[in-house]
Amino acid sequence: MSQEIMQKSVLEALLFLSGEVVGVQSFRDILGLPEADIRNLMNDLMTEYREKNRGILIVEIANGYQMVTNPEYAEWVKKFRTTHASSRLSMPALETLAIIAYRQPIIKAEIEQIRGVNSDSAIRTLYDKRLIKIMGRKEAPGRPFLYGTTREFLQYFGLKDLTELPTLKDLNREEAA
């Protein structure tokens, strides 16, 4: 087995085992390779998976990589998910998360002003699931916490970074269609 094939196999095994985003630094620590080599190997793997139209793909997310299901097979994945439901977010939690994602950093009072209801429970749920974090305190009376999204948020929604969030204009267009 060539060195390159072995290195790719190790990368695949680590991604599969993790089930989450694995940072480039973690791969560097394990394989002892420079970042450029890791990225080249990962780009090769991503191309191989994509060209063979596999059921899973490797994608770059938040300066790391993750194995995800191929969107081409979303219909079957959705069927599977509905019969094997995992921990899902409630509608209030999703609303709160959307507000935080688009308005971060934001304080709880601003979230509640937009939603029109108390958001303690939704914020606690999102914080416990590590989808949001405390980014600091606002320079205002009471010095309230400022909330923002986390790397886990990017992973949960399969985003490389926040620029991949659909714009509000795009969302309004979809809603109108």
Image (cartoon, grey):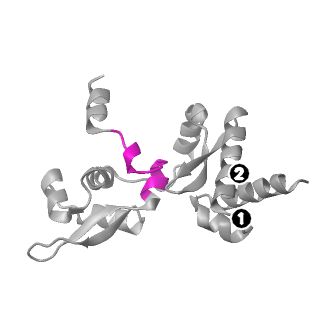
Measured along the vertical axis of the image, is residue 57 above or below residue 28? above
Tell me residue 110's x, y (percent): 15, 59
Quarter occupied by the C terminus: top left
Measured along the vertical axis of the image, is residue 140 above or below residue 150? below
Q: Which residues are magenta?
A: 153-166
Dot label at residue 65: none
Q: CA distance from mark 1 to mark 2?
A: 10 Å
The residue indicated by pointer 2 is: 41
Q: Is residue 64 left or right of residue 177?
A: right
Name the one closer to the observer, 88 or 83.
88
User: Which residue is pictured at 24% across the width and 67% down the height?
Assistant: 146
Q: Is residue 93 left or right of residue 23?
A: left
| 159 within the magenta span | yes
Tell me residue 16's x, y (percent): 68, 56
User: Which residue is pictured at 46% across the width and 60% down the height?
Assistant: 152
What's the residue type where badge 2 is placed? Leu
Q: Quadrant of residue 154?
A: bottom left
Most extreme residue toward the left is 141
The residue indicated by pointer 1 is: 33
User: Which residue is pictured at 43% across the width and 51% down the height?
Assistant: 161
- Where disc 2 sits, the SS reads helix
Q: Are marks 1 and 2 in contact (CB under 8 Å)?
A: yes
| Count of number-bearing discs | 2
User: Which residue is pictured at 52% across the width and 42% down the height?
Assistant: 82
Tell me residue 86's x, y (percent): 51, 53
What's the residue type where badge 1 is placed? Leu
- Where disc 1 sits, the SS reads loop
Name the one closer to the observer, 52 or 5.
5
Quarter occupied by the N terminus: bottom right
Q: Quadrant of residue 80?
A: top right
